[in-house]
Every structure is written in structure tokens, then in C-alpha cells.
């Protein structure tokens, strides 16, 4: 049986829709609002499966996302995309039954066995397989919106599959469909809501008022390449919330990132640096499409899946062992990170009273294989503002880059960066304004809400109880958030209506003349 046939086989088999037919074996992962288990499906010859058990109590908005995730997964069919067997409700949770990918996610592999990153030829295989999935998704009009090593799974044969469609979006979905923010811009449909995981998020997603499209996934793929190469994505030595503030506001030297890289002597090929640089172009229109990236010389001598089996999977502890180990090592921070380092960093940030300048964009330095921030040069153009107890220097004058697919020279208004702008830098556009800050803060708020929920889930999981008062506060907050979302959606619909009215009256007047 060919790989493709084998991958599509589960489609024809009907998995039972009741929890009694499954026997949970081990916990293998924890996401923001989900726990993932290894289990067997008893009536189906005890076939091993993975069950993602998602807490539905979180919010209605999340339920929409979950419905979308399962719907999307069921409609897509590609050898590099993880397709769910079935899903059903168990009490207040949604169970999504999936094929068991025995090696787990690339993130869990790296954090347990390759802390300094994978060998370059292995990265090539992973990126190529992921690009196959992305090329298919984009051709179908879907954005994944959460590309990262944690969402790339591997099985025992080295097969690579893209998973987790919780925040994916269809660019063709009508505005009245799932209710995502979309704006029509120069006859293209662009998404405008902030979604994804901050470290991997494309600049135009954080600046989401400008709209973003398929190329946002390509940026995240570039960050994933750095994650696979160095063992962690840029800025990840900081907690999510802090990294975001730093990303949008603070003078950040990539020597900070260097400091956190464990293997400083690692060398990468020119082709690898070039492909990552092209993914990390600030101007989305200059990033190649997934299809084009597949033709990049980096993949010319790309090996088969066996390479992953020999060099990555061989001797790797099982996904359940790794999960247990991580849990013991890092406690609450199941995904694994240097807590002490983070706290240290956080404290440093909190105590910082020096003036912080906002960055106006990012340069990818091909030679150093790093992202460099770009700062506005003219200090007279900045003023000091207070933000959450920190001093932040905010630009008075805003340099707006030409964003979107129409291209344009994005280098305007960007000056030199002290000691960081090297040969091979790609100049990127600068746009820092109030809306940027609001966009960033919205991501930050989302991240804090998610972290809060995660902690509450873990308390319950570990047998603790969330007090009645706390539950009530959470319920009120959830409802307020829903109300805010509804208000936001209504506002968007009104704007869309106004825009349509404007178009219709324009067309009508045009006909009359
Ligand atoms: N089908 C699967 N087979 C094997 N392991 C899996 C499977 N699905 C998930 N896992 C493991 O469970 C972990 C958690 O997965 P999950 O999708 O809930 O969260 P995540 O994508 O890591 O986090 P987030 O909530 O930020 O998206 C993964 O990192 C992976 O190791």
C-alpha cells in the first residue's frame, strides 16, 4: 500500500463516538486548553490513537474555533496533514480522536533530545514536508496561522504531519461565516484578527489592522526553521507576554538571543540562511509562496524520511516518557524552558528604568542567521510614555510602510542600527503607531488569558479546586470578553455594510453618468 493510500485509510473506517470504546493509556501532551492522551480504541482491535480532550467551558468563541478545527481537519486530505478519525462530546469536553503520531511533536523532540537544534539535513526534510502541507492548504484557500514545531508531528516511520487547526482560517470564508475579522483591501481578502502564538507571529499579524494573508504562515515557517536550528524561537527566553512587549517596544539586541543559544559555533549552509531570510522578509509580498519555496536550492539534495528515523527518532525516548520527564523537570511549564532564566529576565525587565526605544521593524541577518531589530534613528522624534510601570519611548512621527501584496520599497525611514546592521541584512519596513501598540496589547491580553486558563486547568488536573469566587470572577470575565467580541464583530459588520453601501452607491452613480 502506498503512503498516500495508507494515510487516507482512516477515512473509510468508522471510529466509535462514545468514550467507553476507548481506553486511555497515558498523558502525552498539554496545550492551552487541551490535554492529549495516548489511548486504544477497544472495538477496533485496540488500535492506538491520540485523543485531544478539550475543555469546552472556556468560552463560546473557543467552541467556535474547536468546531472549526474539527470541520477543517475532516475536509482536508493530504499526506502531510493530520486528519482526525472522529470527534464527540464527553461531559464538558470535546474529544478529538486522531491517529497516534508516535514520536510526538518536533517541539517535544527538540526540548527533550536536541536542545541545540536538529542537524541541517533533518531540518530540510521537516521543512519540505511542512511546505508540502502548506502549499496544499494555501491552494485550498486556508491559512494555518499557527505554524510552529509544536504543531508538526512525526510518526515512527519519520512521516511528518501538520496538526492543530484550532486557529486556522479560510480566506474565502464570508464575513458572516465564522465571524473572523476580514477586510477587503485592493480587491484581495485579508484577515485582520490576531491569532497564533506570539513568538512565531508575523509582524503584519501583530499589526493586524493592516490585514494579512497566506504569507503570514511563511513568516512563521521561517521562525520555525530558526526554532529547529537553534532549539528555540527568537525571544523565547522571555515569557510570552514579555517577549511581545519587547518585540513591539523595547530596544532588543540579538546578542540577547545569542546569549541564550547553547551551541554558538553552529554553522549553517548559505542555502539555509537564504531560504530563512526570504521567509523572514518584513514585506509579505516579498516572501515566496510555499510552492515557490519548495523549488528553493535548499531542498535540492533533500534526503528521504529515513534520515529522520536514523538521526532523530533512533534512541528517542517515547512521547509519553518525554512528557513525564518534562513535567517532572519543569513543573507547570510542561513545554519546557529555563524558568529561572525567564524569571531573571522578567525581573530585569521589570526593574529596568532606562529609556526603552521602540523598534520599527526587523532585519534578518543572513550571515549571523539571526533577526535584528530596527530602531528609528532620530531621537528627537520620540517621547516618553508610561506603560504598565515601564518607561517606553514612543515615536512621535510614524513611518508607515507600504504593506500588503502590492510591494513597494519598504526601506523608507529606517536608519542604521547600532552595531547590528551587518552585510546581508534585508531592509524591512517600519510602522509603529498607536494601533500597533493596541494590536500588540490585544495579543498580550489573549496570551495572559490563555496562561490564566492553563493554570486553572492544571490546578483542576492536579486535584486542586478553583474557588467559587474565582469561578464567578472567571465567568463574569468570560461574559465580558464575549460581549466585547460581539461588539467588535458588530462594529466590523457595520463597517462592512457601510463599505458595501458606498460601493453600491458608487456603482449606481457610475451607471447614471
Ligand atoms: N496525534 C498525536 N500523536 C502524538 N502526540 C500528539 C498528538 N497530538 C498532540 N500530541 C502531543 O501533545 C502535545 C500537545 O498538543 P496540543 O495540540 O494540545 O498542543 P500544542 O499545539 O503543543 O499547544 P497549543 O495549545 O499552543 O496549540 C504535542 O506537542 C505533541 O507532543
Image (tube, helix red, strand yellow):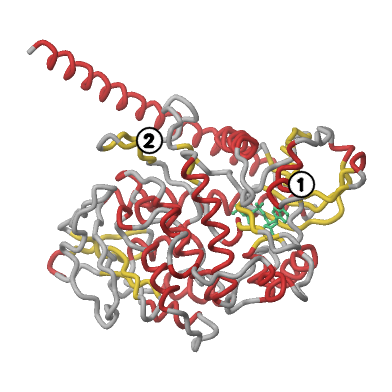
Q: Quadrant of the C terminus?
A: top left
Horizontal and vertical percent position of residue 247: 38, 64
Q: Viewer-proximal residue, 174 or 123?
A: 123
Q: Residue furthest bottom?
A: 265
Dot 1 or dot 2: first in sequence order is 1
Under circle 2, the secondary element is: strand
The answer to whether residue 337 is left or right of residue 156 is left
- At 54% from the left and 69% from the top, the residue drawn is 124
Determine crowd level at label 1: few under 14, some 14-19, many 20+ residues with C-alpha closer than 10 A.
many
Residue indicated by mark 1: 51
Horizontal and vertical percent position of residue 342: 53, 72
Q: Viewer-proximal residue, 319 or 407?
A: 407
Residue indicated by mark 2: 182
Under circle 1, the secondary element is: strand
Horizontal and vertical percent position of residue 221: 48, 60
The answer to whether residue 420 is left or right of residue 270 is left
In the image, residue 251 sits, relative to residue 171, either above or below, namely below
Amino acid at each position: 500500500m502506498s503512503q498516500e493510500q495508507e494515510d487516507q485509510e482512516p477515512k473509510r473506517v468508522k471510529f466509535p463516538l462514545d468514550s467507553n470504546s476507548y481506553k486511555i493509556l497515558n498523558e502525552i501532551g498539554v496545550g492551552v486548553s487541551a490535554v492529549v492522551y495516548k489511548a486504544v480504541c477497544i472495538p477496533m482491535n485496540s488500535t492506538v490513537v491520540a485523543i485531544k480532550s478539550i475543555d469546552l467551558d472556556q468560552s463560546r468563541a473557543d467552541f467556535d474555533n474547536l468546531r472549526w478545527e474539527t470541520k477543517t481537519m475532516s475536509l482536508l486530505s493530504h499526506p502531510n496533514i493530520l486528519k482526525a478519525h472522529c470527534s464527540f462530546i464527553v461531559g464538558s469536553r470535546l474529544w478529538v480522536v486522531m491517529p497516534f503520531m508516535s514520536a510526538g511533536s518536533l517541539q517535544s523532540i527538540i526540548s527533550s533530545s536536541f536542545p541545540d537544534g536538529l542537524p541541517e539535513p533533518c531540518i530540510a526534510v521537516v521543512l519540505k514536508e511542512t511546505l508540502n502541507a502548506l502549499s496544499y492548504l494555501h491552494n485550498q484557500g486556508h491559512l494555518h496561522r499557527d505554524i510552529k514545531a509544536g504543531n508538526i508531528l512525526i510518526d515512527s516511520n519519520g512521516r511528518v504531519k501538520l496538526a492543530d487547526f484550532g486557529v486556522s482560517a479560510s480566506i474565502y470564508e464570508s464575513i458572516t461565516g465564522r465571524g473572523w475579522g476580514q477586510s477587503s483591501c485592493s480587491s484581495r481578502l485579508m484577515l485582520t484578527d490576531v491569532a497564533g502564538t506570539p513568538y512565531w507571529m508575523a509582524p503584519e499579524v501583530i499589526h493586524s489592522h493592516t490585514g494579512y494573508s497566506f504569507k503570514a504562515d511563511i513568516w512563521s515557517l521561517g521562525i520555525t526553521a530558526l526554532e529547529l536550528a537553534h532549539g528555540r524561537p527568537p525571544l523565547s527566553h522571555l515569557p510570552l507576554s514579555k517577549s511581545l512587549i519587547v518585540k513591539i517596544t523595547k530596544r532588543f539586541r540579538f546578542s540577547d538571543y545569542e546569549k541564550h543559544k547553547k551551541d554558538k559555533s553552529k554553522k549553517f549552509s548559505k542555502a539555509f540562511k537564504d531560504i530563512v531570510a526570504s521567509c523572514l522578509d518584513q514585506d509579505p509580498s516579498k516572501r515566496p509562496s510555499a510552492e515557490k519555496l519548495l523549488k528553493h536550492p535548499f531542498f535540492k539534495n533533500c534526503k528521504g524520511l529515513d534520515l529522520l528515523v536514523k538521526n532523530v527518532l533512533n534512541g528517542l525516548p517515547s512521547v509519553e516518557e518525554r512528557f513525564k520527564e518534562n513535567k517532572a523537570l519543569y513543573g507547570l511549564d510542561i513545554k519546557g524552558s529555563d524558568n529561572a532564566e525567564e524569571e531573571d529576565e522578567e525581573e530585569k525587565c521589570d526593574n529596568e528604568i532606562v529609556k526603552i526605544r521602540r523598534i520599527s521593524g526587523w532585519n534578518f541577518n543572513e550571515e549571523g542567521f539571526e533577526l535584528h531589530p530596527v530602531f528609528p534613528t532620530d531621537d528627537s522624534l520620540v517621547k516618553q510614555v508610561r506603560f504598565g510601570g515601564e518607561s517606553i519611548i514612543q515615536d512621535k512621527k510614524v513611518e508607515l510602510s507600504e504593506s500588503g501584496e502590492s510591494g513597494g520599497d519598504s526601506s523608507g525611514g529606517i536608519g542604521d542600527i547600532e552595531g547590528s546592521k551587518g552585510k546581508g541584512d534585508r531592509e524591512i519596513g517600519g510602522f509603529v503607531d498607536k494601533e500597533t501598540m493596541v494590536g500588540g496589547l490585544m495579543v498580550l491580553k489573549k496570551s495572559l488569558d490563555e496562561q490564566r486558563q492553563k493554570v486553572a486547568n492544571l490546578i483542576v488536573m492536579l486535584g486542586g479546586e478553583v474557588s467559587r469566587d474565582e469561578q464567578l470572577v472567571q465567568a463574569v470575565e468570560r461574559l465580558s470578553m464575549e460581549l466585547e467580541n460581539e461588539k467588535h464583530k458588530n462594529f466590523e459588520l457595520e463597517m462592512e455594510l457601510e463599505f458595501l453601501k458606498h460601493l453600491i452607491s458608487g456603482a449606481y452613480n457610475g451607471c447614471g453618468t
